[in-house]
Image (cartoon, rainbow, N blue to C red):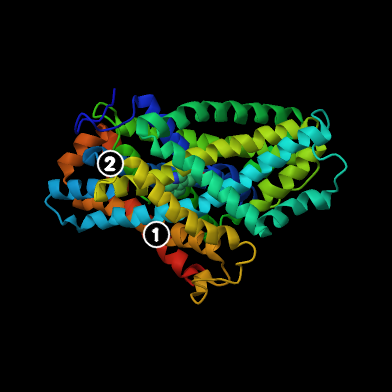
Amino acid sequence: MALSQSGPARDGWSSRTAFILAAIGSAVGLGNLVRFPAEAGENGGGAFVLFYIACVILIGLPVLLSETLIGRHGQAAAPESFRKVAEHSRKSTAWEHVASLGVLSAFLILSFYCVLGGWVMYYIGIFFADIFNTGITGGAFAGVSVQEVEGIFPAMIANGPVTVILNIVFLAITMYFVSRGVSGGIEKVAVYLMPAFFVLLVGITVYGLFGGAIDQTWDYLFTFEPEKLTGPVMLAAVGQAFFSLSLGVAGMVTYGAYVGRNVNLGVTSGVIATADTLVALLAGLCIFPIVFAAGLSPNGGLGLMFQTLPHAFQEIPGGTLIGLAFFIMVGFAALTSSVSLLEAPTAWVIDRFRFTRPVATVMVSVCAAIVGTLCALSTGSLAWFQPLGFIPMFEGMGVLDTLDTLTGKITMPVGALLTSIFIGWVANKRLVDLENGLGGVLHVFWRFLVCWLCPIALSAILLVGIFPSIIE
Ligand code: TRP
């Protein structure tokens, strides 16, 4: 039975657990598995991790609760939900444009996220093929030189036809689930894939820990090096916390709209943020033992997942199967996230233009495939096309990096900033208090965070993101 109450025909999560799993599925993605471990290791280990956790609790969580609250009150696509809260509070309905911007950001993130999803599928393919070439007992890629294994990645991203096609395949899989609706598709992906994801993550972590490189991993991830926690690193941590919790783009507003009145949003937001952070930490404990056991030193950025790890799988026993399991796990996480990124614009098209869900899903997906094709080619033949290259912060960036920077440094912080101002200062207090499910001290603390800390911190991020020279 659908939990939402605004009309018998309206689709919604079939249970509180389904909502929690879908929201965790949205939050847990490439951000946790690729970016967090790379950043934590490079940028001051324990100090970075602690600072990141503080960002999640003090800035991420209050905004997460604000977003789900707006969605649950509105029971509609994100802009419509913002408008309903504004109307109910007798404030300007222009606030709905915060969500319109969010929907646009979700669309842009979707466009490049599926390109990365395509890369992950490519790696699933090569590890699968390796079972037939190498067998399953020894390390992966028997007889292939290290240079060749590390060369797979640059060759793949430069290969236009491969990246374009895989991007479209990944998008098509995402589209299939979104077109089947909330309880019939989106929820199903989360309910089946998230438990499988956790089993794989824990299994590979345990396997890696037997490799014996626990001490080195612990030192790398948790040695406290506060001097590395510079201004830019702190900003990267806040940005990462927002990306990881899927905030600032109306995605969680959209998911909140399918939640029933009987669900306590304060508690569920806490569960979602905790799970997302634990997965990020576990991802570090999963990846680095394998890297160190193979005697390698981790490199940062995308190279960690797509070059160092495949090389490490070459060195460890059973590397083919572990590598295959690893990339399948990453694929699951990416899919449950891309589904949420597609749902936000799709819900908007359904609400705004009254199209049926399948039609709306196909329309948004086709547009995302077009932008995605530009992203996919931007790491190869289209690298010369730097659409915003004349602006210093986008200098030298192809389409993919431009969209990543534009959303990460501008549209997401703007969306989150305006959301916190909207809930903290504009929306009717009684409405907010009724929806948030918090009591006593927690309620007062949350109010303080949304009204003061979030707007101030987010304005700072935005300013420094656009004018990095401020802190140099
Ligand atoms: N949070 C996901 C990750 O960590 C990515 C993601 C999914 C996302 N939905 C989002 C990011 C909405 C921002 C907004 O990989």
Instruction: Please determine whether, in this image, residue 283 is positioned above or below residue 404.
Output: above
The crowding category of the residue bearing disc 2, from other C-alpha atoms within 10 Å (few below 14, some 14 to 19, many at least 20), is many
Residue type at mark 2?
A: Gly
Instruction: Please determine whether, in this image, residue 374 is positioned above or below residue 238.
Output: below
Label 1, secondary structure: give it.
Answer: helix
- Is residue 158 visible to us here? yes
Query: In the rendered structure, are the residues bearing label 2 and label 1 in contact, judged by CB atoms less than 8 Å apart?
Result: no
Residue furthest left as drawn:
90
Residue in the foreground of this view, choosing between 160 and 233? 160
Q: In the image, what residue occupies the spot 74% across and 27% down?
A: 210
Left or right: 85, with 68 as reference point: left
Q: CA distance from mark 2 to mark 1?
A: 19 Å
Q: How many marks?
A: 2
Q: Is mark 2 within 8 Å of ligand 1?
A: no
The x and y percentages for residue 328 are 62, 35
Screen quadrant of the N terminus: top left
- Is residue 285 visible to us here? no
Left or right: 1, with 282 as reference point: left
Residue furthest bottom as drawn:
390
- Tag 2 residue: 71
Label 2, secondary structure: give it.
Answer: helix
Residue type at mark 1?
A: Thr
Which of marks 1 and 2 precedes in the sequence? 2
Residue in the foreground of this view, choosing between 3 and 267? 3
Instruction: Place residue 95 in its image quadrant.
Output: bottom left
The x and y percentages for residue 321 are 73, 31
The x and y percentages for residue 161 are 63, 56
Instruction: Please determine whether, in this image, residue 267 is positioned above or below residue 75.
Output: above
- Tag 1 residue: 411
